[in-house]
Image (cartoon, rainbow, N blue to C red):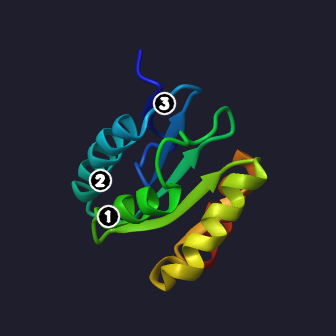
Amino acid sequence: MPLITISWLDDEETVMLINAERGWTWNEMFVTAQRANELVAARPHVVDSIYNFNHTTAPFNTSLLSQMNALTRQVPPNAGKVYIVDSLSFGIKMVEIFTRISRSWADRLMICSGMEQALEDVRQRRAAHK
């Protein structure tokens, strides 16, 4: 059974959930991210993504910042906002540092303490664009 899964949160396929479970590896994350990017690129509209890390921590066998940088280079043009759901302060700090270093991601990446916060931001952004 894969430790990182992809699913759609709505019938219109505008919000993708990438859910990670304890024990995932960076190799599995890169494979999953590539598949997620293919799914996003195949859609004719903007797709927001929620990466749920609430039940796990990132593997520490490599630099988290360099892994995040590598992942963000693969994103298709119709990728919307990326939500990182992580209640651990280490993960939150790493994403904050990453968005300072990579300014192009500052407005497209949001750290959330729970799924509810991410989904509420999606709802508010969608309502504002209608």
Q: Amino acid at mark 2?
A: Asn
Question: Disc 2 or 1, which lies upstream in sequence?
Answer: 2
Label 3 to label 2: alpha-carbon separation = 19 Å
The spot of residue 104 in percent (x, y) is 45, 83
Label 2 to label 1: alpha-carbon separation = 6 Å
Residue lying at 37% horizontally and 58% vertically, measured from the top left: 71
Q: Are marks 3 and 2 in contact (CB under 8 Å)?
A: no
Question: Disc 1 or 3, which lies upstream in sequence?
Answer: 3
Q: Residue furthest front?
A: 61
Residue 14's label in the rendered image is none
Residue lying at 40% horizontally and 48% vertically, measured from the top left: 13
Residue lying at 53% horizontally and 25% vertically, measured from the top left: 23
The spot of residue 80 in percent (x, y) is 44, 68
Residue with the mark numbered 3: 24
- Specify the quadrant of the image occupied by residue 60: top right
Residue with the mark numbered 2: 37
Residue with the mark numbered 1: 75
Task: Sort mark 1 into few (<14), some (14-19) or many (20+) by Cα contacts within 10 Å.
Answer: some
Q: Is residue 70 left or right of residue 112?
A: left
